[in-house]
Amino acid sequence: MIPAILPTYARANLTFVKGEGSWLVDDQGRRFLDIGGGIAVNALGHAHPELVETLQQQASQLWHTSNLYHIPNQTALADRLVASTFADTMFFTNSGTEAMECAVKMARKYFSHNGQPERYKMIAFEQSFHGRTLGMISAAGAEKLTKGFGPMLEGFTQVPLHDLEALKMAIDDETAAIIIEPVQGEGGIIPVTDQFMRDIRALCEEHGLLLIMDEIQCGVGRTGKLFAHEWSGVTPDIMAVAKGIGGGFPLGVCLATEAAAVGMVAGSHGTTYGGNPLACAVGSKVMDIIANDAFLAQVSEKSGLFRQSLEGLVASHPEVFEEVRGAGLMLGIKCKVTNMDVVHAGYDVQLLTIPGGDNVIRILPPLNISSDDIKEAVARLDQAATAIEATL
Ligand SMILES: *Cc1c(COP(=O)(O)O)cnc(C)c1O
């Protein structure tokens, strides 16, 4: 019999009832070290006191009014993001995939507004992930996302990452935009090289294309800069953000330059819930905490410690692990055994990691994880790997 919840997830047999910092407590009172961060969402860990207070405060004032009226929290968060990014304007959503939908609609509208409606095609990259709407599975294109859901939305192609020639070949008179994750997340924690980012920007300039970045997973301090593209010095025209920006409250946002947003006039796009007072109160508090040099320097410091310890771990378990990769606190360990076996061995030692593409386990801990918790996480990964070795 079908369960009451559509069985689209092969869920682990774990039920959490409480969280604190990097730790989760299950319904049997066991404490799990959570270095998956709810898939890069819990940027400040569980039950961060300032986020809890902010949400409670706003909850007693006002939950929802709709976007028919001004929402001061939304304006405050937007002003703050304008001040600290390339963007001049933005649209708030409830999720990442909606932010990407807005990005794609905006790019198409840009060309139609500018008298080139025939330019609607977009080039994305293999192994990318942009969400689960029909539009975004069409954009990413992988069969595991699209199978059985066809026909796909027309106008998307995918080329291999870091293949400049393939990218050039894919551009034609109908191309509108290039879509890229500066660090691929679901695909297996694959950072795009600074050079490739610059090459893409140059192609966009040459052909008049818009550059859309998906920083839903790699943004908001995750790599040690506020946004991952800052490492390359290349800025997008349009960027989707979600996950970490809400610290666990559903919130997404599509940011853009004034030029790129030119067609998005009154009535052209909308959302009932997006950017509501609760979400934007939390989002502003997340930004207060993360968007400063001292906090971001801590992320890089913790990254150094984590990465170095993981290199040691990989070296001492050569039959289980292959390599460490990633940026900041967006780390991946490529496995030699099946990655799900490592994730499961983690559960046995009360450690939560996240599987990813290319046989990787993803490590996406709270950005404020303590050094002690990092050491504990590596110790538990060591135990998990030792347990796996005993079965080989
Ligand atoms: C998670 C993710 C999405 C989809 O976000 P949702 O909030 O699940 O809709 C899109 N792109 C990337 C890079 C992501 O990591």
Image (tube, rainbow, N blue to C red):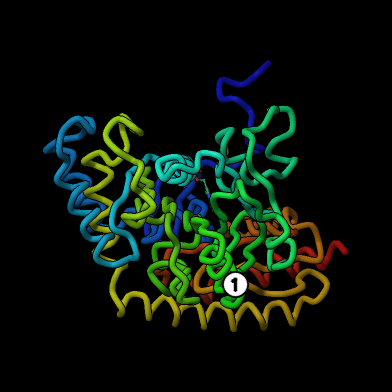
Q: Is residue 308 left or right of residue 222?
A: right
Q: Amino acid at mark 1?
A: Asp
Q: Residue furthest top?
A: 1
Residue placed most toward the observer, 40 or 56: 40
> What x and y, as percent, mark residue 52?
25, 51
> Quadrant where the N terminus lies?
top right
Residue at point 60%, 49% (across, down) = 175
Q: Residue furthest right?
A: 392
Q: At numbered mark 1, what does the secondary structure look like: helix, strand or loop?
A: helix
Q: Is residue 10 left or right of residue 180?
A: right
Residue at point 32%, 44% (across, down) = 92
> What x and y, as percent, mark residue 116?
49, 43
> Quadrant where the C terminus lies?
bottom right
Query: Dividing the picture into quarters, in which one does residue 264 lie?
Result: top left
> What x and y, as percent, mark residue 281?
22, 49
Image position of 77 with respect to 131: above or below: below
Image position of 204 with respect to 128: above or below: below
Q: What count of labels does the image hold?
A: 1
Residue 32 visible (yes or no): no
